Image: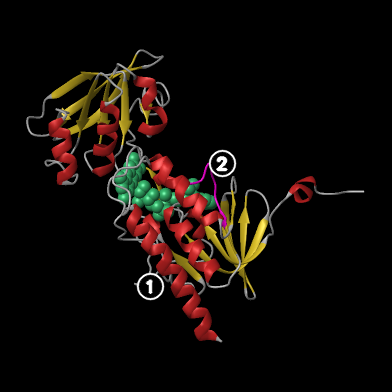
Amino acid sequence: MQFNVRSNERDYETDYDVIIIGAGAAGYSAGIYIKRSGMSVAILEREAVPGGNTALSPLVENYLGFKAIEGSDLAEEFRKHYSEYGKIITEIEVRNIKKEGNNFVIETNRETFTARAVIVSTGTTHRKMNVPGEEEYYGKGISYCSTCDGYLFKGKDVAVIGGGNSGAISALYLNGIAKNVSIIAHSKIKKCEDAYIKSLDEKKIPFILNAETEEFLGDGKKLTGLRYKDLVTGDEKTVNLDGVFIYIGVIPQTSFLKNIGVKLDSHGFIVTDDKCRTNVPGIYAAGDVIAGSEEQIATAVGDGSRAAITLYTDKMNKK
Ligand code: FAD
């Protein structure tokens, strides 16, 4: 006799009124509204630990109701709140979506799920620099996550590459751990918010502008520094470093939407109307994955609620 061990152990269904893809701020927010509208819901999350980029943010100081909170703690508050309402199924990566009759069929690395509607809240992942040494020294001095790896650089010299908000927040976080922290940015101006510039100045964290990183240097076993070009003078400069944290932008997580025909912009972000509808009826999007997103926790939470309310309204209008 044949039986499927996983399905016997499973503590979740595979059919829901609404499937949400991605357990970040947007997905949790959408899930609460969906369930409170009387629909069944589950969130499918690729990682073992849910929370998305909120959980990876060292310190959040601009989310209403929390003057300053570690991202992992805020994400845990989100998880606990959503869990009062719906299921989170972790370590499930959505790979494809297709339509069969009234159902969306959601193919993953494990089971196949069905739902009458889908909210995509898959956010973004970090962009790579694609310069020599980046692959070789990844995990040997190069990281894309200061909260995950910062502790490895206690008392050492590190730099953050990228002068936007994420880079600034990471530099401020690393300042409490590493001996020396600097920010190296390709731009002519400091691109982060004034509040972060003020904090960086107060903590005397140097900002090296007009600096195009050309190569990561190492001894074959670990990173020893980097070489950059000064875009004003044209000079080549070398900095000795034990660690580098790269925050140069993001890539939307949308490759699984190719076959279903959801419209994406030229960078792969999802194009929606102002109510979070995509061009495919029944598929909605929320959070950082939307084209033109402000890439903030507050806006992701707002999008999640908007997507869920629109979905419910569309459903009611169809009746
Ligand atoms: P995400 O948080 O990215 O969540 C998406 C989820 O989808 C992830 O858990 C991912 O694993 C999952 N997923 C992706 N693809 C799949 C798939 N195919 N199948 C299943 N699951 C999938 N914002 C602020 O407002 N204040 C701050 O102080 C702040 N600091 C930040 C610091 C750093 C270092 C970073 C990187 C970001 C920071 N942000 C901050 C931005 C904020 O974290 C994001 O705007 C927010 O997390 C977006 O939420 P989201 O739900 O749209 O996406």
Report if the beta carbon of the residue with label 2 is closer than 8 angstroms to ligand 1: no
Q: CA distance from mark 2 to mark 1?
A: 31 Å
Q: Is residue 131 above or below residue 300?
A: above
Q: Is residue 184 left or right of residue 16?
A: left
The kind of secondary structure the magenta stretch mainly shows is loop
Q: Earlier in the sequence, mark 2 or mark 1?
A: 2
Q: Is 92 on the left-hand or right-hand side of 128?
A: right
Residue at image coords 19%, 41%: 196
* Residue placed furthest toward the left: 233
Out of 127 and 318, give the one closest to the viewer: 318
Label 1, ligand 1: CB separation under 8 Å: no
Q: Is residue 48 magenta?
A: yes
**SS assignment at label 1:** loop
Q: Position of residue 300 (x, y in %)?
A: 37, 57
Relative image position of residue 89 (x, y in whole percent):
60, 51
Q: To which residue does mark 2 refer?
A: 48
Inspect this view and state whether residue 35 appears. Answer: yes
Query: Is 207 colored magenta in this rendering?
Result: no
Q: Residues within 10 Å of mark 1 (few under 14, many from 20)?
A: some
Q: Residue at x 30, y 19 (%)?
A: 217
Q: Which residue is mark 1?
A: 275
**Kind of residue at badge 1:** Lys
Task: Tell me which amino acid carries mark 2.
Answer: Ala
Range drawn in magenta = 43-51
